[in-house]
Image (tube, rainbow, N blue to C red):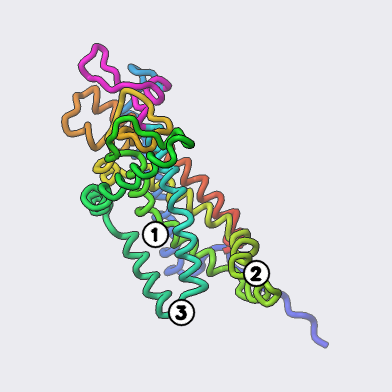
Amino acid sequence: MTDAAVRRKLLSKPSRTEDRVFFAVARAAGYSSFVIIGLILFFLSIRAWPAFVEQGPLEFAFGVGWDNTTEPPILHIGPMLWGSLLIAAIGTFIAVPMAISIAYFIEFLAPTSVAKAATVIVDLLAAIPSVVLGLWGLGVFSPVGAQWAQMLSETLSPFLPFLANETGTFLRSPFIASIVVAVMIVPLISSVTREMFSQVDKEIIKGALALGGTRESVLRQVILPTSAGGILGGVLLALGRAMGETVAIFFVLNLVFSDYNWFNLLEPQGGAIASLILARFGEATPEEVEALLAAGVVLFVITLIINAIASFIVQKAQPWRKDL
């Protein structure tokens, strides 16, 4: 009997010249993203530093009012920051059930030909520019959304105060802006969810159905728990996308700087940092330009934090990627 063959160790580094060149280029491309992000943040911080010093970091981020006629000017983004978070959160809340339903239909219910067509359509929806969705929201959906908002206000405002409307105007509200944002991020969440569903062991699903489980119970007790981490990561990625949306929200939301609109979803007042930058940058004074860049820094940091959390969750949901 011969001795067992000694198992060879895989090389940790490329040995051929072609592989070394490829690895070097790929590594440089990967690190360049960190460099670019760092340079963007450094440039914005340098230009925005005078605004942080003059306004005060906390007062700038959480104060109210935007008036460049006073001395010194009052340039605070509190209502815009809260509006960005509120619209993104509501839009994500609306989009998640839709996206999970689409992903489940494509992966488990639809015939192969229909699933392929639906996948293409969802991917095409993800590629629609935000300005097109903004024009759709302004010209097509806003009148319909205003009717929905009026119906909700008349029927539910006695029980749900955040659905009250004292102005009588239902256009350009956070409610309409949230639905437009939801339409934008549904394809992103659906794509991530579909990918996670495709990695669930089909034999486990067949076994659960064979034991008497319904499709609803299998989705709730087998598929979703298995895919929860990756789906949550996709939701947070979409939340970061919603936080940075500019043109679509600008078209369908009335920006109000003087006060927080905490939860009055149907009132024609709200905020969004990215839309603030779009609305004010063209006619901004030098002090306003510095403040708008400071607003960009705040939004940039928040988005980075959300995306970092999403990447961490996805990594935890797919531990096998550590070995790849």
Q: Do the residues labelled 1 and 3 touch (CB within 8 Å)?
A: no
Instruction: Work out whether mark 2 precedes mark 3 in sequence or the reverse, and give the earlier one.
Output: 2
Residue that sits furthest to the bottom in the current view: 1
Residue 182 to residue 212: above or below: above
Local secondary structure at mark 2: loop
Residue 98, quarter of picture: bottom left
Indicate the amino acid at tag 3.
Pro
Residue that carries the numbered disc 3 in the rendered image: 111
**Residue 151 at x, y percent in the picture:** 36, 44
**Residue 57 at x, y percent in the picture:** 40, 22
Instruction: Tell us which disc is closer to us: 2 or 3.
Output: 3
Residue 180 to residue 227: above or below: above
Residue that sits furthest to the left in the current view: 283
Within 10 Å of the Cα at label 2, are there few (<14), some (14-19), or many (20+) other Cα atoms? Answer: few
Residue that carries the numbered disc 1 in the rendered image: 187
Q: In this view of the protein, which residue sits in the foreground, 94 or 224? A: 94
Of the numbered discs in the image, which one, if any, rests on residue 9?
A: 2
Picture quarter with the N terminus: bottom right
Q: Give the range drawn in magenta.
A: 58-80
Instruction: Tell us which disc is closer to us: 2 or 1.
Output: 1
Residue 84 covered by magenta stretch: no
